[in-house]
Image (cartoon, rainbow, N blue to C red):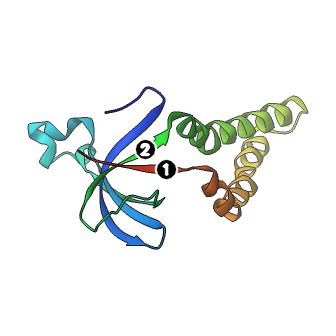
Amino acid sequence: MQNDKTIEHTGIVRSVDNNQVIVNIESHPACSSCLASGICDLSESADKQISVRDNGYRLERGQKVHVVMKQSMGYRALFLGYLLPFLIVITILITMTALGVPEPVSGISALLSLVPYYSIIYFKKEKIGKSFSFTIKKTD
């Protein structure tokens, strides 16, 4: 059951510690039911582990659960991971080109501007990660 305001995936509990649960989510691409999926690289599925704060359920290893995230958190992740870096690159590229800097230098500078951006993201990952909250719902 998925609400318009949430993103929900089914997963299996891998471990339960004090108030933290590790859930393994297997993502299935849309083409997994295709007959050619065995030879197609696009059909590979990947397991993802998500750390979730236990919200009082008595969970056991191997139990099926739903991991729920607000849809707005997904939009925030897209913004931080793709849109903001794109805007940084385009802004620097246009600004440097307008100032008369040669195009190769402008292009390289615009791309190199991502190094400090992603460095900041890397060093602030704990703080950023705390703002993305997942919850668990037991399956019926």
Q: In the figure, 40 relative to 120: above or below?
A: above
Picture residue at 14% right of the left edge, 48% below the top: 39
* Placement of the N terminus among the 4 image quadrants: top left
Q: Residue 104: x percent and y percent?
A: 74, 43
Near mark 2 (Cα within 10 A), the count class, few <14, some 14-19 or many ≥20, is some
> What element does badge 1 sit on?
strand
Q: Quadrant of residue 103?
A: top right
Q: Which residue is mark 1?
A: 134
Q: Which residue is mark 2?
A: 68
Q: Residue 131: x percent and y percent?
A: 63, 51
Q: Residue furthest bottom?
A: 17
The tag on residue 37 is none
Picture residue at 68% right of the left edge, 42% below the top: 85
Q: Amino acid at mark 1?
A: Phe
> What element does badge 2 sit on?
strand
* Placement of the C terminus among the 4 image quadrants: top left
